[in-house]
Amino acid sequence: MIECVQGDIAHQPDMEAVVNAANAQLRPGGGVAGALHRAAGPELDRACRPLAPICPGEAVITAAFGLPNRHVIHCLGPVYGVDEPADELLADCYLHALALAEREGLRSVAFPALSAGAFGYPLEEAARVALETVSATLPRCPHLERVRFVLFDAETAALFQRLLDEQP
Ligand code: ADP
């Protein structure tokens, strides 16, 4: 049900939704947001504007336009050391994203490592929050069959896989 792969979140054609590590204004920016907006095209930016700004821990959903998915779920993770309590706000991102996916009846969602890039969240801590929150929430999501963590590099993918294997 949960898998961890190395890859690019903008190239997950078999997933119904991909999650964006958004900024508050839901603008393109760098990292995950840059990759998703580049692949989706300018319509994604237009669709995001009326939904912005969002607060840390929130999630909103749009169509995916040029991406090979049905939806993009945009989450604003906490900026580490600024938005507190960071672990609760990061967990809220995953909870709210899964709730939106479930509301839409989606069967598959792919997440990046929210907050673990420009927002400075220590990787292992961010991975633990992500995996614990998704593992605890999936049993209450009857539509969702697959959650994929898409990690940019091999070490991050290996870390997520190790922590997933340690889950009870
Ligand atoms: P945040 O601002 O929430 O920290 P970032 O986009 O800066 O989000 O980074 C989140 C994580 O996603 C980082 O670990 C980064 O290396 C990784 N990442 C960046 N681009 C991609 C991509 N195209 N696909 C998957 N992961 C990515």
Image (cartoon, grey):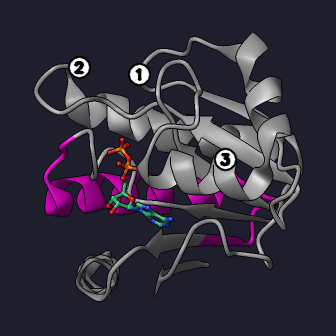
Q: Are marks 3 and 2 in contact (CB under 8 Å)?
A: no
Q: Regarding mark 2 in the picture, which secondary structure is present there?
A: loop
Q: Which residues are magenta?
A: 120-147
Residue 45: % across, % down: 73, 31
Q: Name the N-terminal-most of marks 3 and 2.
A: 3
Above-or-below relation of 11 to 32: below
Residue 56, labelled with which disc? Answer: 1
Can see residue 140?
no
Q: CA distance from mark 3 to mark 2?
A: 25 Å
Q: Which residue is mark 3?
A: 37
Q: Are marks 2 and 1 in contact (CB under 8 Å)?
A: yes
Residue 129 part of the magenta-drawn span: yes
Q: Which residue is mark 2?
A: 83
Q: Amino acid at mark 1?
A: Pro
Q: Regarding mark 1 in the picture, which secondary structure is present there?
A: loop
Q: CA distance from mark 3 to mark 1?
A: 20 Å
Q: Nearer the viewer, mark 3 or mark 1?
A: 3
Quadrant placement of the C terminus: bottom left
Above-or-below relation of 71 to 62: below
Q: Regarding mark 3 in the picture, which secondary structure is present there?
A: helix
Residue 5: % across, % down: 48, 84
Q: Nearer the viewer, mark 3 or mark 2?
A: 3
Q: Name the N-terminal-most of marks 2 and 1.
A: 1
Q: Residues within 10 Å of mark 2 (few under 14, many from 20)?
A: some
Residue 24: % across, % down: 48, 20
Label 1 residue near ligand 1, CB within 8 Å: no
